[in-house]
Image: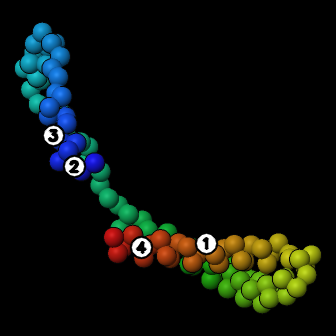
């Protein structure tokens, strides 16, 4: 159905409910309608702060060497499934999550 057809249907079948003036009395007693709460967006400072903290922890604890070791041993993991150590699985999972996070961030920035 087209939007015009839907609007016409509701206009043709509009019904009123007798509330004996309740809505008029209600709006007369309210001095103003509630306004939506305005949230302060602090993500502009929180996201870079946590990204920097995560990067520093990653570098200081030598995460780059663990990822390089895990990814180099990942090549042999598919030859024999039994050789897939937890380090390989975690490295693969974290790499996939990092790629997903970058893609999601880029997609949100474009939208």
What mark, if any, has residue 107 been given in the picture? 4
In this picture, residue 47 sits left or right of residue 24: right
Q: Where is residue 11 drawn, in percent x and y?
A: 14, 34
Local SS, label 2: helix
Q: Nearer the viewer, mark 1 or mark 4?
A: 4
| Distance Cα–Cα, label 4 vs label 2 | 30 Å
Q: Which residue is mark 2?
A: 3
Which residue is tagged 3?
Answer: 8
User: Which residue is the site of mark 1?
Assistant: 97
Residue 36 lies, with reference to residue 111, above or below; the image says: above
Q: CA distance from mark 4 to mark 3?
A: 38 Å
The dot on residue 16 is none
Q: Is residue 100 left or right of residue 47?
A: right
Considering only order in the chain, which callout, 2 or 4, is on the residue closer to the N terminus? 2
* Upstream in sequence: badge 2 or badge 1: 2
Residue depicted at 16% across the width and 27% down the height: 14
* Percent of width and height locating residue 37: 26, 43
């Amino acid at each position: 159905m087209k939007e015009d057809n839907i609007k016409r249907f509701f206009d043709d079948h509009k019904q009123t409910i007798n509330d004996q003036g309740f809505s008029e009395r209600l709006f007369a007693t309210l001095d103003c309608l509630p306004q939506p709460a305005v949230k302060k967006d602090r993500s502009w400072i929180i996201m870079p702060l946590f990204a920097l903290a995560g990067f520093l922890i990653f570098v200081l604890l030598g995460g780059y060497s663990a990822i390089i070791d895990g990814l180099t041993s990942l090549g042999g993991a598919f030859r024999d499934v039994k050789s897939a150590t937890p380090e390989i699985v975690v490295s693969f999972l974290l790499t996939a999550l990092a790629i997903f996070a970058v893609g999601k961030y880029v997609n949100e920035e474009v939208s």
